[in-house]
Image: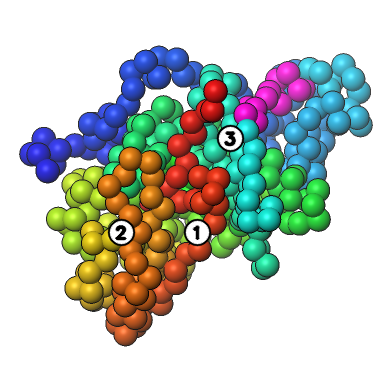
Amino acid sequence: MTEPARRYGASPERLGLPVVAAERRRTSRPPRHLADLDPAGRRAAVAELGERDFRASQLATHYFGRFERDPAAMTDLPEAARARLAAALLPTLLTAVREQSCDGGATRKALWRLHDGALVESVLMRYPDRTTVCVSSQAGCGMACPFCATGQAGLTRSLSTAEIVDQVVWFAGAAARSGDRLSHVVFMGMGEPLANYARVVEAVRRLTVPPPDGLGLSQRHITVSTAGLVPAMHRLAGEGLPVTLALSLHAPDDELRDELVPVNQRWPVAEVLDAAWAYAARTGRRVSIEYAMIRNVNDQPWRADLLGRLLAGRLAHVNLIPLNPTPGSRWDASPKPVEREFVRRLRIAGVPTTVRDTRGREIDGACGQLAASEVA
Ligand code: SAH
């Protein structure tokens, strides 16, 4: 890596990562939405419109309690009030451009156009014991991990709290209509959640506060995944929101991690793991170490042993992700015997290890494949 790269700070711009200037100019702040506001903020917004206080909880009950996003269906609100409230608090944030499903309908991906034309994707995965939505926190991503499709195009912009929450509410509604209950949310779609810190934390609050103020999901069922922004990891530990933290490690040594996760040049392996252990100590939550298995790149037995030594005795488990090859990438997934040997060595070291399934591959909805390109 070049010397200047070592001096880069945390922001995408300072990381020297691709932020396309033209894209930047075209993006703009999304309109304010009910889901951006806490209950007091909602009451204040309703009062500003000259409406009675209880209208705020009526709206919240529709939106968070019944997953109703369409003001026209909120028929218990008088028509004039409904129009005023909808215009001020329920603007359309996400317009579906495309929906795809696979795995017999158990995996569904949605491509959304945001108010300024930026595109993001979210994925719903139904399992026998849970239903998970994978949300985007940014349009694009500034982390530039070379094996990830989202990383290739750079960052367009961060999403607002409501743009994040609305992805979940949409899928919660879709799940409910098929007799299913959304139980888990993972911030593993497009973007680096901790680079959009305040809005992501606020979104987590909306997702976990009991209805009608929020969706009432369990904090333990929310996973925030990070490339390793150390100061933000420490800050998250102090929020009193014991969500599951996933750390995208992908290499146990700085030489390789500098290449696979470029933000490692700023916060190396030892520092990012220290931040992970501090998070575990503070929250009591086991940290999930994400490791994409890339053939002949990071899958050698010695790297499994080194990883095992780094993690042994810690409140952590390893989640191996078979690499999902992205278009134009020179990398491929590790062969199964190599993967099995890697798992075996980690387990010998006493590190709980699982291999993630590769849901959504056929619809480019698997990990790292979200690129939000629109087919003409
Ligand atoms: N910015 C966050 C969220 C990224 S997506 C982060 O870095 O953690 C969630 C996970 O998918 C991350 O661990 C990411 O490194 C991984 N991932 C990205 N591209 C992948 C690919 N092509 N194959 C497998 N996993 C990938």
- Label 2 to label 1, Cα distance in Å? 14 Å
Give the numbered dot on residue 294.
2
Q: Quadrant of residue 220?
A: bottom right
Q: Is mark 1 within 8 Å of ligand 1?
A: no
In magenta stretch: residue 92: yes
Q: Which residue is mark 1?
A: 358
Asked whether the viewer can see residue 262, the reply is yes
Foreground tag (2 vs 3): 2
Q: Residue at x 19, y 55 (%)?
A: 256
Which element is circle 3 on?
A: strand
Q: Callout 1: 10 Å neighbours few (<14), some, many (20+)?
A: some
Q: Is residue 169 above or below residue 154?
A: below
Residue 324 in percent (x, y) is at 41, 53
Instruction: Magenta stretch: give its range.
Output: 85-97
Q: Secondary structure at mark 1?
A: loop
Task: Name the residue at the bottom extreme.
Answer: 348
Residue drawn at 42 percent across, 66 percent down: 319
Q: Are marks 2 and 1 in contact (CB under 8 Å)?
A: no
Name the amino acid, label 2.
Ile
Secondary structure of the residue carrying tag 2 is loop
Marks 2/3: CA–CA distance: 27 Å
Q: Say which mark, if any, is on residue 111.
A: 3
Check if mark 3's residue and mark 1's residue have beta carbons within 8 Å.
no
Of callouts 2 and 1, the N-terminal one: 2
Pointer 3 local density, CA inside 10 Å: few below 14, some 14–19, many at least 20:
many
Q: Quadrant of the C terminus?
A: top right
Q: Is residue 36 above or below residue 279?
A: above
- Three-letter code, disc 1: Thr
Indicate the position of residue 8 as horizontal and vertical percent values. 19, 37
Q: Is residue 76 magenta?
A: no
